[in-house]
Image: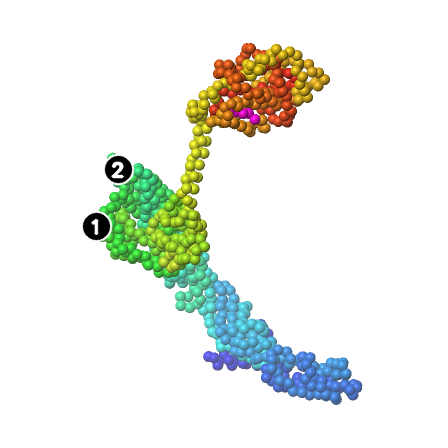
Amino acid sequence: MLFAWIVPAAICLSMRFTAEACSKGNVTASKLPHGVAEICDKGNMTANSASHVQPGTNITLSCQLKQLKYNEQCKIAIFFNSSELIINYGTSVSTKFQVLTYGKHMFTCKIVCEYKKKLICGVDIMSGNPPDQPRNVSCIQYGTDGNPTCTWDKGRLTYINTTYVIQLSDGIDLFCFLEENLNNKSGSLVLSKKLNFDSAYTVVVAASNELGSAFSQPLMFMLIDIVKPHPPRLLVGFENSVTNFALVWHDEVRAQHCRIRYRPLTGYAWNTVENVNSENFSLYGLEPHTDYEFQVSCKIHPERGLWSNWSAFQAQTPEAVPTGLLDVWYKTQDVDSQRQNISLFWKALSKSEAKGRILQYTVTLEALNRRGSKAVEAEVTTQTNYTKTTEKVDYRITVTADNSRGSSPPAAIVTDRGIGDLPPPQKVSAIPMGNGSILVSWKPPVKSTAFVNGYVVEWMDTHRKKSPEPQPTWIKLVASNLSAVISEHVKDNVCYDISVFALYQDRAGRVASVRGYSREKAPSAGPQMYTTPQTNGVLVSWEDVPSHQQMGCITGYNIYLRKKDSKVAPAVYAISNATSRHEFYITNLQRGENYVLWMTASTAAGESPCGNRELVCLESAVDWLVVVLTCSFVVFSVCVCSMRPARKALYSLLSATVPQWHNKAIPDPANATWAKSYASVKGELSVPSSPFLRDTSSFEEPETIEVEEGFIKTDSQIFHDKLIFSNVHSTENHDWHSESSFEKQEAEYKALPSTTDGDSYEHQLPYLYRKMPEVAEQMQTASEYLANPITDRAPGYLPAGILSPATDPTDEHQERECSPISVFPTTFLTPVFSYGGKLNLDTVRLNCSSFTR
């Protein structure tokens, strides 16, 4: 058969196919020339090879001038791509050249006269490969109503122009289809001829260039073998059951043999159904609420031909009632004597168990030991945890997961406050495994009347455990398991509190706990320390090392104590981390000595760097006693003085302890003997008017005026013989001077400024009363002195020598009040004058009725 095809093909090439023989092109195979010659006006250039050669070919190049019109100094030369190959004097030149590279080689002949070059002639030689035999010839037609497309592999590159011709024969006619491509390694050509299903066809690919030709092996086929149907149009519908699907598709009329495949979108393995001879099919047992991808492919003949591309369709199955049982865990915490917090936690169902989208969770609480009827409470939540404050009774709690089709089976637990008879597991241990995992093992509980039907292993980051609403991680195990490797949410260099519970039917027994870690290091920082000096020592307290710096489980602390500037090794106080109190009391310290303290934390992997340093010095007991007594006295005095009843009691106490003469009323100077002796004196007293008189041109006695009383704020002085009023320098500060002599009972009276009538005054009386000579005979009895007499005044009286330089007129004028804690039974008001002139005693009125004794 092969010989029967090759012979006609060779005849076809040798006859130089015309348009009548091949409708699309022809292949030429003319005899190759023995040499190349170029004839030019100024000369000729020849090569002894063909214009197309293969690499490695040796060629001889020659150049001959036609006329001798050039100077004898000129030379003839042959160049290759601007590189000089040979140069000679004369009219001709010849040289040999070996072609080593692919592509175009340009040779030229030139006349070289001094530095000028003139082109005479040239030839071009192409270097390439003959075509390889076309391989892997195949043809395909997309759809029953299309044109075939043939492809083949060309082999190595030829680097020169190569022609490819597809020769198609149906046994009667021969059709040629031309394709030209210089670079691609593969060829492709669409045949512009309709094929029918009844004929057998043969295809040969012929390749040809200047260096040779080649033919592929013939490809024989029928149209049914190369037709690839179009993908069918697929539709998917649901049947009555949520797990049954009906697939319907439409394809080309002749494509009656199909295959089906489907898978969940989250999966990789395909489920395949072969040999489907109809355009519909039903699938059963699909997972509810799952996204699936369905695909269908068809072909014309069950044993021959090509499968169509897969047509794809995606759909989600309907929901179903959840089938999984929730994994529920709980924790209780007392709020007060009557209430408790119940915190429930559960794990979400897997997608295969949920059978749809979980809309909510229903939690029911049934009180077990409440008197009267059993109360049942039901609440819903969308979270995977639930907290409720309830009475301190036992509850049976159930939790269900709900979707649009129904609820899952209830998961039940019983909170038992009387779990003292439910013993915990024994010998719980945690072994670090590294890579975020911990091996937890235990022994069964001691014998109990209740039957153990499982265990719960719970673990939580030690720092997350202190949060207001900690949510643990846990796993439930059957009773035969006495160990578990925990890895969920476990990280290296983190400490975990691990608890193991034995399950007795629906309730958990007492807990057995241990701390563990996957991998740990020494802490990267020490604790923050605080010191409080006390009477006999120093109280050291500290804070936890920050969680990110603990690097594992803290096993203990070390406190270092050393005298300042001492070279001796410090004293070390080792403290176990078993206690929750972060404080330690250090005794037997020397008073007045400076000590330096610092602190470290430790894990099983090592000790941390030291934390902050504190300098401590204990004060002596005497110093502390003085400070305490002084502070106590100040606080007591402030409290007493701030209360009116206390002030009165203190005043009465002080009044009873002072001498009796302090209870006398202050005498009125108008009743004094020396004052009355001046009553007979007539006429005006000549006094300087500059400090007191407004008008210096007149010495007449001014008109009598009223003098306003002013209050003097005085400080009490007790246990003194005599009180002397000194000059008043300001409105708030007063200087009191005392003398211890009973014989010298003198007083200086100083006038206070007045704001009577709203006028500013220009003159003041700095000394209203002057000291009088001490005369023992003038001592008066208590009955002679009457406070504020309103009769028997000496009119026109003015004490002699009362004038003195005026005080600073810029002083602030304010009223004075009596001190609320005065030890004197009575006080007097200092007269205040606003104007100059003579002072008449009938204008002076002293009143101390407003003073409090």
Is residue 718 visible in this depiction of the protein?
yes
Amino acid type for the residue under numbered disc 2: Arg
Give the residue displayed 54% in from the left and 19% down from the top.
775
Q: From the viewer's perspective, is residue 347 above or below residue 624?
A: below
- For label 2, the SS is loop
Q: Are marks 2 and 1 in contact (CB under 8 Å)?
A: no
Asked if residue 456 is among those painted magenta in the image, a careful observer would answer no
Q: Give the Cα distance between marks 2 and 1.
A: 27 Å
- The residue at which mark 1 appears reads as 448
Main SS, magenta region, reads strand
| Quarter location, residue 245 | bottom left
Residue 565 location, x and y as percent?
45, 55
Is residue 249 visible in this depiction of the protein?
no
Q: Indicate which disc residue 370 carries.
A: 2
Q: Count residues near mark 1 (Cα–Cα under 10 Å), then give few for <14, some for 14-19, many for 20+.
A: few
Q: Count residues near mark 2 (Cα–Cα under 10 Å), then give few for <14, some for 14-19, many for 20+.
A: some
Q: From the viewer's perspective, is residue 195 above or below residue 464?
A: below
Left/right placement of residue 82 relative to residue 576 reads right
Q: Nearer the viewer, residue 582 or 395?
A: 582
Q: From the viewer's perspective, is residue 386 above or below residue 525?
A: above
Q: Indicate which disc residue 78 carries.
A: none
Q: Of label 2 and label 1, which has the lower sequence position? A: 2
Give the residue displayed 75% in from the left and 83% down from the top.
112
| Quarter location, residue 363 | top left
Residue 216 location, x and y as percent?
51, 77
The range drawn in magenta is 722-726
Residue 339 location, x and y as percent?
32, 38
